[in-house]
Amino acid sequence: MFDTAWIANFHRAAGLAAPDAIFWGALLLVAGALAGEVIARNSRLPRLVGYTLAGCAAALAGYGPDIPLTGMTRLVLDIALALLLFEIGSRVRLRWLRFNPALLWTSLAEAAAGGAAVFAALLWMGVTMPVAAACAVISIPSSAAVAGRVALELGAEGQVTDRMILLTALNTLYAVLALTVLRGWWHAGQATDVMAALGLLAQSFLGSLLLAALLAGLVAAAARRLDLRNESSVLLVLGLVVLALGAARMAHLSTLLVPLLAGLLLRNVTDRPWIWPRHFGTAGGVMVLMMFVIVGASWSPAALVAGGLAGLVLVAARAIGKGVMVLALARPAGASARQGLALAVTLTPLSGTALVLLSELHHAGPELAMQVAPIVLSAVAILELLGPIAVQAALRLAGDLAPGANAVKEQR
Amino acid sequence: MSLEPFASSRPLTMGVELELQIVNTHDYNLAPAAADLMRLMKGRRIPGDVKPEITRGMIEMATGICENHAQALAELREIRDNLVDCARKLDVRLCGGGTHPFQDWSRMRIYDTPRFHEISELYGYLSKQFTIFGQHVHIGCPGPDQALVLLHGMSRFIPHLIALAASSPFVQGTDTGFHSARLNSVFAFPLSGRAPFVQRWDDFEVFFGKMARTGVVKSMKDFYWDIRPKPEFGTIEVRVLDTPLTVEKAAALAGLIQCLARWLRTERPYALNEDDYLPYTFNRFQACRFGLGATFVDPTSGEHRLLRDDLLSIFDKLEVHAMELRAEEAIVLLRNEIKGLGNDAGWIRQQQEREHLLPEVVRLQALRWQGAAA
């Protein structure tokens, strides 16, 4: 995972056993937690900025994880994202789209325009078509991690927060489906074998749906019998989500799709409120923290040199594509112009979801993924600090944060 | 600032104001969506109007001047339907109930107007605890002296009205044991309680002048009395009702108050006497705490009765007036409630007993408010 040369030499010299996954995982946790608390005490920024900074420091020192993510880093990312996506999915009432159709148009338009803008801009830069297409698909989703985490830590509530969560759930869904099509298409050897691609899509979607339904059913059964607001009872749900994630990995199903669909099913099959501590309490919180450190570390100065300019173009094109659509449809969707602007900003972060999509792409076509990686990693690097800070400012602009909200100071 | 002159209004006309809860559809906590709702309501033609309230999880709806129960009900339904429609576009819901059963007052946000910020600064946490939801009923009076007489006559029925309308058993996640815990928050304010016993407007002006000279009050708005005259409208305003769970109940309560006013005005069944206020706070406490099962101390005879029984005998006396005012339906609804579950507080407790989940109870309240069968 990390370049462990110096430590390897040190422990050998000291006559100790080699450091294992627990050692590295704990180091990640300590570094992230420490940086998070330093940020929380000395600024008004959310802690995740600190987690990310800890990761950045590791990346700068050359200890970034290998891309595509494998082993423990991938596992942590999968678990954390599964929890966040399940949580986000379980807050999305699809009936909202029926009562407010302009929101559905917003969702479709921002995803399509964001992807199209990235595709066009990268082609214009001279990037090849497959690479531009892959980059476009990977940049469709906004960050479930930042949306879920910033809103929680700052206690954000209001229309922009709700809409950010809705649009993030939907664009993540679109991206996973689009990537599946892309993979099928790529598998079929660049030929335009549409049927094969669609077949793969149907197969993976139905499989994911089945597993998601099973998970949703079990969680609903648990929630009816237990009070999930209790930190101990909720561990059962945490276990179920992780179990479903394991099953998804075994069946080669999307680790993003299964928890997201399960959350959506849970919310939309019955109206009863499902309430549990965010991230399923402290246990899930550990995973989320470690994920931010890993994402923060998943770039290298070399990648930035290779793909920095293209990454910057991607970020700009994506923000413009998404932003124009969200702003244009703000009024019809019943939001003020200020809320529209804020919502557009909250969709800009790009993080863990993109890394997982990149890794999935790697399974399908390693050569393609190697070309895509520098661009996507640069974009992630550009947005990983800027994104959360912009989201915080946007939520404040929209009035979704209590005046002077500062998670730390309020809790003290 | 001196007391404004008392406008004249047609006797026995009425107006209804309801403070509503705006809740999210995720955990059914209060949602800060008042400004969004106001924006969406702007272009809509409704009778009466819709106003923001002190915290952003509340909104107030008001009918225009209504002749009778049917008109009030029709107006309330129309405003309700418009509000529910706008709320759906925002994925929030509206509901009745005098308190939100589990909201954390420290997280409430003040609606952005100078007056609300001023109040918030003066009263501190009290103003946030004031995130409570009431129904106000205005009754038109031809002149100020008649208004004061009606006010003191109506005071006798404050316990009955409290018990009928009570819908706030839960506060901050716990069962308070009260039927109307909302009124406990009102009583915390320094100028709550009852109006002074004066029956002529000249005397009331003297009282107001003395109070204003102390600097304690500037306008009638600073009094949080159970019933207060509203010179601007030419009405008296009954303020002890918790917001009921349905507009039908709200209209019925308004209809009852209108019948009481007509009875008091035409028959003068009781001579006014300041001593009638002696058991006032006792009766009021009993009604808040025990609802329809409260002990009612008859101010004239000193007799102790069950509030429920006293109410049923009053309904009998109101029969003629209900017919004249075409408010029979209102009385029937209330009578059936008394014989059934009692008040909305009883219904809320029953739901919680079954669901063991307050957010689910709020969801069911929201369904009832929309007019769907729960």
Image (cartoon, rainbow, N blue to C red):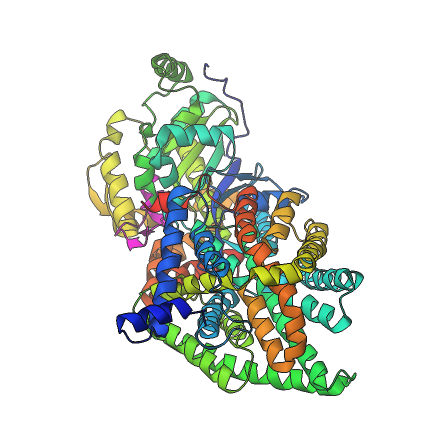
Q: Please check the rendered image and state whether residue B199 is part of the magenta-colored stretch, yes or no.
A: no
Give the side of residue A375 with respect to residue B235, left or right: right
Q: Quadrant location of residue B219?
A: top left
Quadrant assignment, res B203: top left
Left or right: A366 in relation to A87? right
Can you see residue B36? yes
At which x and y percent is residue A259? Answer: 50, 74
- Position of A397 relative to A130 (above/below): above
Residue A198 location (% of width, % of height): 71, 83
- Residue at horizontal 57%, vertical 36%? B65
Residue at 40%, 78% (x, y): give it: A240
Judged left or right of residue B185, residue B295 is left
Give the percent coordinates (x, y) of residue A373: 62, 68
Name the residue: 31% across, 50% down.
B179
Asked whether B163 falls inside the magenta stretch, the response is yes
**Is residue B264 positioned above or below B142 on the image?**
below
Front residue of A87/B216: it is A87
The vertical placement of A219 against A353, above or below, is below
Q: Specify the farthest residue to the front.
A: A13
- Residue A63 at x, y = what percent? 46, 64
Which one is nearer the viewer's eye here, A365 or B262?
A: A365
Which segment is the magenta one? B156-181
